Image (spheres, helix red, strand yellow):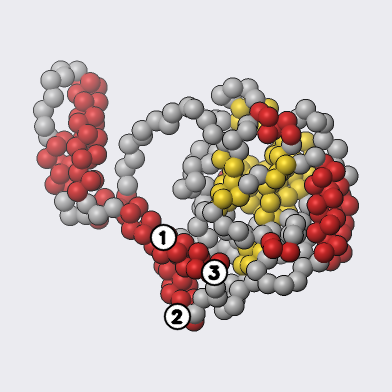
Amino acid sequence: MESGCNILCLQETKRQEFSQTYLRNFCPPNFDEFHFLPSNGASGGILVSWQGASFSREVIFQNEYAVSISFTSHMNEDTWVLTTVYAPCTYEGKRQFLNWFHSIQMPDEINWLIVGDFNLIRRPEDRNKEGGDIQEMYLFNEAINSLGLIEIPLHGRKYTWTNKQTEPLLERLDWFFSSASWTLSYPNTAAKTLLMETSDHWPCVIEISTSIPRAQVFRFENCWLMIDSFLPTAQQNWSIPTAATDSAKNITAKFKNLRRILRTWKTSISSLKLLIQRVKSLIYLLESIELLRDLSIQEWNFKNILCDDHSP
């Protein structure tokens, strides 16, 4: 997960069951805890997964629209509530959701974060084409104001969903809100979009700034095994003698030496991450052009080729 997040929220999973084995398909091993709301047939569904080493949790509420989980950080003992939303897309479903959303009772002193796919827009300019239900916008904004929620600013894109047609409809359907208490506790909270790869929604990440430095961890990349110079380099440097006489200290010294050599060696080869980033940059450029005008048939085909080649 390139975002480096600690908690993952997915909406519209369209799955009725999740297991730790299935999560390994798209989550790192340290995401070892999860809670899910099953889909209704092939519609809806919510998944929240997190690093058990970082948080303890208590599920405090769930219904057909949302899951609310109270998290406590193992780092500083801060406690806060995360509500993940997936709202219906039908006329009647939206009205029922808004009635529920408006009636939520949350104490003012709780640090509360609300994220998800609301399937609603707040204003006409939240879509690139004319239309939208003004009454729905009014009811949505009225509920937000009634709850005293503060919208977390989104950086990177104006819209978060596309129907992926040749002349696409673009809308802002994904929203991020916090309570006033959260804003006072974490004033630098912001949201940003990532690169769309498979979904029709742009993935987003919520960032809460921290002064805690990140460790520089050495990571072995499996693609190195396919490079001709890797094995000779590893063998040559593994055979370098060390000054240690104890077997355990000797092998530890060899690993440290090999790690140092490989850090230098990897800078001399073409970087897979750099190639991936270049592809992502091309896709992002096309997405930026899409905000200004409709893409041509050739540009849409090129974007689809890039997305298909980059898909896992």
Residue 7 position in % (x across, y down): 59, 41
**Camera-nearest residue between 188 and 43:** 188
Q: Residue 292 carries which label?
A: 3
- Which numbered disc flags the more N-terminal residue, 3 or 2? 3
Q: Which residue lies furthest to the top in this view?
A: 245
Choose top left, top right, bottom left or bottom right for residue 59.
top right
Image depth: mark 3 or mark 2 in front: 3
Name the residue carrying label 1.
281
The structure residue drawn at horizontal position 14% and vertical position 37%, both measured from the top left corner, is 237
Q: How crowded is mark 2: few (under 14 residues within 10 Å), some or many (20 or more)?
A: few
Choose top left, top right, bottom left or bottom right for residue 256.
top left
Which residue type does callout 1 highlight? Ser
Which residue type does callout 3 highlight? Leu
How far apart marks 1 and 2 lie (CA) works out to 18 Å
**Disc 3, SS:** helix
Name the residue carrying label 2.
298
Residue 4 position in % (x across, y down): 49, 42
